[in-house]
Image: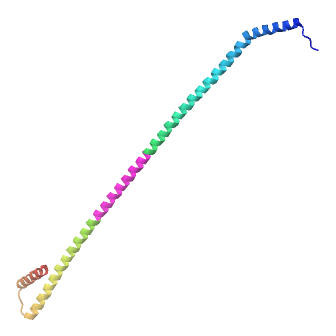
Amino acid sequence: MLQLEPGMMIWTWVTFFVLLVILSRVAWKPLLSAVENREKSIADSLKKAEEASADAQKLLEEQQRSVQIAQESIQKMMKENKDLAEKIKNEMLERARAEAQKLQQRAKEEIERETEAAVLKLKTQVADLAIQAASRLIQENLDNTKQRDLIDLYIKELDQLEKN
């Protein structure tokens, strides 16, 4: 059985307190300082992590702003390019219309010249035929200048009749 001896109890308590004093001076302070250092280290790490998180958030926001600005710039350039293409298309259409009108006008003028030339040629042929017919009917030879004067008179009368 277990017996309690007062001497042994006193020495155990004395040894305990002596050991407690020695450990408090030698081991307790370094243990507490190690724990405090560890707490500071953890607190510093948490603070740095929060700062890094805040910096990352700022960078993310800046990147998002940069992306938005780039998208706006791209959209602006696309609109400008579309407007420029539309302007060029309209200019080309206008030039094509103007060229078509010029060609049409030239064709009309050419047709009018050809018509006038054909009418003049026809008038000359009619005049020659009229002279031949008249000289056969009259059976007399008029000189060439009289014939031309008569033809010119006849043509002038035809022109006046056409104009009326």
Q: Does residue 12 lie above or below 75 as drawn?
A: above
Of residues 103 and 5, the one nearer the viewer is 5
Locate the N terminus and report the quarter of the image it occupies: top right
Q: Residue at x 88, y 6 (%)?
A: 6
Of residues 45 and 16, the one nearer the viewer is 16
Left or right placement of residue 61 versus residue 151 in this view = right
Q: Residue at x 20, y 77 (%)?
A: 115
Of residues 114 and 60, the one nearer the viewer is 60
Q: Residue at x 24, y 68 (%)?
A: 105
- Residue 100, given in percent of the width and then of the height, sits at 29, 66
Residue 32, magenta (yes or no): no
- Residue 92, given in percent of the width and then of the height, sits at 33, 59
- Residue 46, given in percent of the width and then of the height, sits at 61, 27
Q: Quadrant of residue 29?
A: top right
Q: Does residue 130 lie above or below 96 as drawn?
A: below
Residue 88, magenta (yes or no): yes
Q: Does residue 48 lie above or below 136 as drawn?
A: above
Colouring: rainbow
Q: Quadrant of residue 39?
A: top right
- Residue 139, given in percent of the width and then of the height, sits at 7, 94
Q: Main secondary structure of the magenta part?
A: helix
Of all residues, the one furthest to the right in this rendering is 1
Left or right placement of residue 56 versus residue 123 in this view = right
Of all residues, the one furthest to the top in this rendering is 7
Q: Quadrant of residue 163?
A: bottom left
Left or right placement of residue 70 versus residue 34 in this view = left
In the image, which residues are magenta? 73-99
Q: Residue at x 37, y 54 (%)?
A: 85
Q: How many marks?
A: 0
Left or right placement of residue 136 versus residue 115 in this view = left
Locate the C terminus and report the quarter of the image it occupies: bottom left
